[in-house]
Amino acid sequence: MRKEKPVSMSVIRRLPRYHRFLSELAKNSVTRISSQELSEKMGFTASQVRQDFNCFGGFGQQGYGYNVPQLRAAIEEILGLQNQFPCILVGAGNLGKAIAGHMPFMQLGFRLIGVFDNSPKVIGQKIGGQDIRPYDTIGAFYQEHQPAMAILCVPKENVEAIADELYGLGMRSFWNFGHYDIVLKHPDVTVENVHMNDSLMTLCYKLSAGGPS
């Protein structure tokens, strides 16, 4: 049960972690867990766990805790995983092929319906169940299929032009692996930027500092 009060993105970003852990519990036939047990497994305080779930009305019962399958299903509904938004991927290099071939899109709220590249070496190949199409056909494809999100696996110098073209077609949601901030030019888009370099440098700091993760 969702509350009307806006929920902070810090809470939303913790939900996939809850979902991942609850999925593991479900695989192991665990049906009930307390906020204390959940907090110990995930590294949060029990108070934090309860506060997070209270943002959506609360799901636990006093003296019982949380029903694992029900809580997992509630998080899936909150995240909208049932929507199966159609998406396309631009850039079928090594990264694009890895994402198209190994991401469980259907479990994460999306359906991959098209892959595009401008290299004759990869056009016509099949990845993720999709034939790689010439990039210059993306406009006609968009008009016919109306994808809701674009995954950009292209070099930084190409992101701006591709994002501009897709924006002009009507695209307003991006999963961006290129190191270019689309929001600066198009502030009305929804973007998740993935900076693997930043993550690796953060890990380097942790190792250099010698402290716990």
Image (spheres, grey):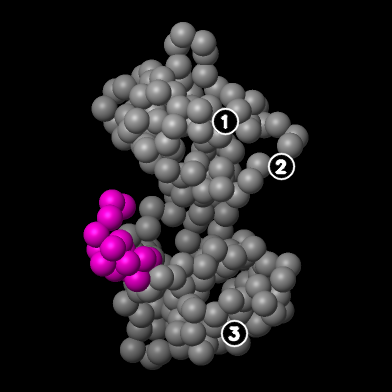
The answer to whether residue 83 is left or right of residue 64 is: right
What is the spatial separation of the Cα atoms under label 2 and label 3, in whole angstroms?
32 Å
Give, as a three-letter code, the residue at label 1. Gln
Q: Position of residue 163 (x, y in %)?
A: 61, 79
Label drawn at residue 98: none
Give, as a three-letter code, the residue at label 3. Glu
**Residue found at x 46% / y 8%:** 63
Label drawn at residue 6: 2
- Name the residue that disc number 3 marks: 160
Whether 66 is drawn above or below 26: the answer is above
Can residue 189 be found in the magenta stretch?
no
The span shown in magenta is 199-213
Instruction: For marks 1 and 3, give the one nearer the viewer.
Output: 1
**Residue found at x 52% / y 19%:** 60
Dot 2 surroundings within 10 Å: few (below 14), some, or many (20 or more)? few
Q: Quadrant of the N terminus?
A: top right
Whether 58 is drawn above or below 174: the answer is above
Q: Is residue 181 visible?
A: yes
Counting the numbered discs, the total is: 3
Mark 2 or mark 3: whose residue is earlier in sequence? 2
- Name the residue that disc number 1 marks: 51
Element assignment for label 3: helix
Instruction: For marks 2 and 3, give the one nearer the viewer.
Output: 2
Q: Position of residue 57 (x, y in %)?
A: 64, 26
Q: Main SS type for the magenta part?
A: helix
Element assignment for label 1: helix
What is the spatial separation of the Cα atoms under label 2 and label 1, in whole angstroms?
14 Å
